[in-house]
Amino acid sequence: MSTVDPADFARVMARVPTPVTVVTTVDPGGRRWGFTASSFSSLSLDPTLVLVCPARTASCHDAFVSADRFLVNVLASGQAGVAGAFARPGADKFTRSPMEPREFGLPGLADATARIACALHDVLDGGDHSILVGRVEAVWTSDAEPLVYYNRLFTRPGGSPALASSA
């Protein structure tokens, strides 16, 4: 049992800058799913693995833990609006989004900083989240400056506020 207060832990972790990603998949029925995640990291070079962690309470959770593939869109600094749209529960997040089929036909952003297409390698227990381990099958990069989440704000690596774009 942890002796650290969850509110204190959340406050400390807010001070750790993280990349902002929107992770997408398509279920067997053709429905698109997506969520905003700052819990994303590289895991291994051999084999090439990444991890991303959806909340167990998210409406998209079951779609991701049973997916064959998923796509990690690393957002560019002007895409804070996209991050906000995919962080909200409820309505179809793809209705007004700039997502279009990319690697393996998965929904992706043409102007992201990077895209990482993965096959689901494993699903691990992460407490109130699941840990999706993805085996990297394709990558794409651009020169776009990344969006960073720091101190509960979307920002740029240099610390200036990020510009919101339409979702």
Image (tube, rainbow, N blue to C red):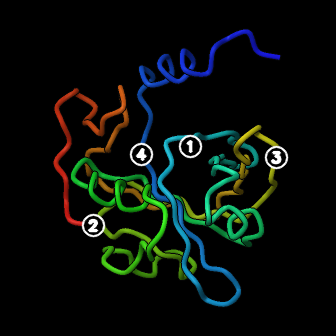
Q: What residue is shown at x 71% (from left), y 65% (from top)?
A: 119
- Residue 41 x/y as whole percent: 58, 40
| Mark 4: secondary structure | loop
Where's the N terminus, which quadrant? top right
Q: Is residue 2 above or below residue 59?
A: above
Where's the C terminus, which quadrant? bottom left
Q: Are marks 4 and 2 in contact (CB under 8 Å)?
A: no
- Residue 75 x/y as whole percent: 36, 53
Q: What residue is shown at x 44% (from left), y 34% (from top)?
A: 18
Residue type pointed to by label 4: Val
Q: According to the image, label 4 marks what residue?
A: 20
| Mark 2: secondary structure | loop
Count neighbours of disc 3 (C-alpha within 10 A) and say few if under 14, some if 14 to 19, many if 20 or more. few
Q: Are marks 4 and 3 in contact (CB under 8 Å)?
A: no
Question: Does label 1 or label 4 sit earlier along the sequence?
Answer: 4
Q: According to the image, label 2 marks what residue?
A: 167
Count neighbours of disc 4 (C-alpha within 10 A) and say few if under 14, some if 14 to 19, many if 20 or more. many
Look at discs 4 and 2 and give the one toward the viewer.
2
- For the residues marked 3 and 1, what is the alpha-carbon distance in whole angstroms? 14 Å
